[in-house]
Amino acid sequence: MILVDGYNLIGQEAGALSGLSLEKEREKLVRRLEQLSAVSGERFLVVFDSSVQARKGVATKTSISHNSSVSVAFSKAGQTADGWILKYLSRRPSESAILVTRDRELAQKARKLGFRVEPDLSRLEAKAEPYFSQSLSGSQSGGDLLSSISPKSREALAQARKKAKS
């Protein structure tokens, strides 16, 4: 499981400068994680701070939504995403998750709990890069990266999925 500090990752990638709404930025991040999951087989849990939504005038959610590879959680009112993440990590074995954040305080606390912390998705994207005919981290305006998988790699992924199901 890769746990992602959602707004932290959006912010570090200059999300505020993209011109997209906060909701669109979240959707873009979730799509990116779904595409990485399709190639890497990793599962993701991305956590967003509901207080950021409230400050930006976006409807506050506190639910968790799931698909097969990416789950999305929003902290409760009065709770930060950092607090949500630390509570989640404190209930898990340290080898069960990797945290993606550049928040130094959160990273330090997660490391004290024994978890590995990555500042961004670059290592995972580098591992996935051979499966794509164009860069995962390249600045594409909402293009479907999954469609950029080479036909040979797409066939290999289909075979692997078929084998995994049987």
Image (cartoon, helix red, strand yellow):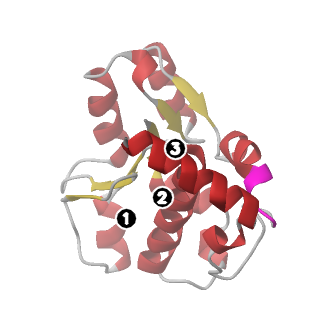
The local crowd at label 3, few if under 14, some if 14 to 19, many if 20 or more residues have their Cα within 10 Å, is: few
Quarter of the rendering occupied by the N terminus: top left
Circle 3/circle 1 CB separation < 8 Å: no
Q: Which residue is mark 3?
A: 41
Circle 3/circle 2 CB separation < 8 Å: no
Residue 155 in magenta stretch: no
Q: In the image, what residue type sits under mark 2?
A: Tyr
Q: Which residue is mark 1?
A: 52
- Image coordinates of residue 51 in percent, x first then y, are 30, 61
Chief secondary structure of the magenta portion: helix
Circle 2/circle 1 CB separation < 8 Å: yes
Q: Earlier in the sequence, mark 2 or mark 1?
A: 2
Q: Earlier in the sequence, mark 3 or mark 2?
A: 2
Q: In the image, what residue type sits under mark 3?
A: Gly
Q: In the image, what residue type sits under mark 1?
A: Val
161 or 132: nearer the viewer = 161
What's the magenta region? 129-133
Q: Earlier in the sequence, mark 3 or mark 1?
A: 3
Q: Residue at x 66, y 42 (%)?
A: 124
Secondary structure of the residue carrying tag 1 is: helix
Secondary structure of the residue carrying tag 3 is: loop
Q: Which residue is mark 2?
A: 7
Which of the two discs, 3 and 1, sits closer to the camera?
3
Residue 117 vertical placement versus 43 (above, below): above
Query: In the figure, residue 35 lies in which quadrant?
Result: bottom right
| Disc 2 from disc 1: Cα separation | 8 Å
Secondary structure of the residue carrying tag 2 is: helix
Residue 28 vertical placement versus 65 (above, below): below
| Disc 3 from disc 2: Cα separation | 23 Å
Relative to 79, 125 lies left or right: right
Quarter of the rendering occupied by the C terminus: top left
